[in-house]
Image: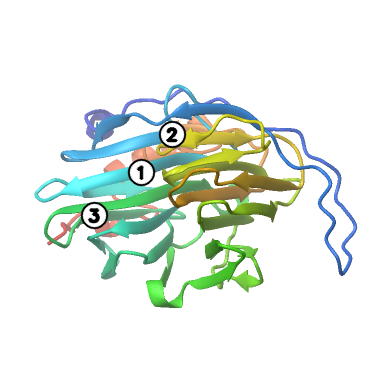
Amino acid sequence: MHSLMSSYFQNIDIYSYMFAKMPEREVSDVVVLKEPRSVVRKFLARPQREGAGAVVRRSIGRFELRYFDPFLVLDEFSVTAPAGFPDHPHRGFETVTYMLQGAVTHEDFEGHKGTIGAGDLQWMTAGRGIVHSEMPAAQGTQKGLQLWINLSSKYKMIEPRYQEIASKDIAEATKDDVKVRVIAGEALGAKSPVYTRTPTMYLDFTLKPGAHLQQPIPSTYNAFVYVLEGEGVFGSSKSSPTSAHHILLLGLGDSLETWNKSSKPLRFILVGGEPLGEPVAQLGPFVMNTQEEIDQTIDDFDKYVNGFEKARHWRSQ
């Protein structure tokens, strides 16, 4: 039963890394931030091979951090044709692809096909099953971020769906030398239209030299920062600067404080989500709650049933 899958995927030992929840705060017209979050863990995402010749810097989903509830994987990817991510399945979670440079063409067995370029967003809910490919669509090197967000047990077997937003339609705001692109959630008065089945915030900040930011974060969320460009000071003004390709896990609190004390722009993403608090069983691109459900998923995929019917005869172009 496992023969088809075993050549592609290795079992991943998942453990939960989840902070305790803080009590809900009362909502008023003026938000008073009293508990800035500190950085409780930091490490460098080192390059590794993935897919067919692609290079990713994986910060969540590797041995240092298997799972950060509800986040399963964060990859900063770099791919140049003919390398890419050829036909592969998913079940039980969502993938969020945010392009930084170049373009990638997505194609799946439902007939959905499209290209996302620099600044574009694709939010894919794999649900009960999807088989797709993600391949370079432009010359040179394509770069972006892909985040995997877990789904609660009640949503794992829903029908697949997509939310795609062109760069020009992503909500943006600027204030006091701080610019934000709102992928999910809201910041500086701008709000994303993306529906997040697992409550999530995803903000792309750029701070000019000398800028200071205080961004609210729901106190119940697990949250992290991933630095894309430049270097910044996070959590405390006395902290050492953090440079590109580092992930910072944030502790308890209601906000994040950031300073750009360098002479160059600082760009980072701030991501937070409501922990699911459910058991996680994972085999590569399949994420369920129990090993029995993983076994059933493998069987479904091998036999082309229960959501994978169209995979029998489909191949990407």
Q: CA distance from mark 1 to mark 2?
A: 8 Å
Q: Is residue 125 above or below residue 79?
A: below
Q: Secondary structure at mark 2?
A: strand
Q: Which of the 4 image quarters holds residue 120?
A: bottom left
Quadrant (top left/top right/bottom left/bottom right) for the C terminus: bottom left
Q: Nearer the viewer, residue 74 or 12?
A: 74
Q: Residue furthest bottom?
A: 169
User: Mark 2 belongs to which amino acid?
Assistant: Ser
Q: Circle 2 is placed at which residue position?
A: 59
Q: Are marks 1 and 2 in contact (CB under 8 Å)?
A: yes
Label 3 or label 2, whichever lies nearer to me, is 2
Q: CA distance from mark 3 to mark 2?
A: 22 Å
Query: Dot 2, crowdedness within 10 Å: few (<14), some or many (≥20)?
Result: many
The disc at residue 151 is none
Q: Residue at x 58, y 39 (%)?
A: 233
Q: Is residue 110 above or below residue 142?
A: below
Residue 122 x/y as whole percent: 39, 63
Q: Residue at x 65, y 67 (%)?
A: 188
Residue 160 x/y as whole percent: 43, 62
Query: Dot 1, crowdedness within 10 Å: few (<14), some or many (≥20)?
Result: many
Q: Nearer the viewer, residue 316 or 176?
A: 176
User: Mark 3 belongs to which amino acid?
Assistant: Ser
Q: Which of the 4 image quarters holds residue 236?
A: top right
How many numbered marks appear? 3
Label 3 or label 1, whichever lies nearer to me, is 1
In the rendered image, is residue 1 in sight?
no
Q: Circle 3 is placed at which residue position?
A: 133
Q: Circle 1 is placed at which residue position?
A: 76
User: Mark 1 belongs to which amino acid?
Assistant: Glu
Q: Nearer the viewer, residue 316 or 252?
A: 252
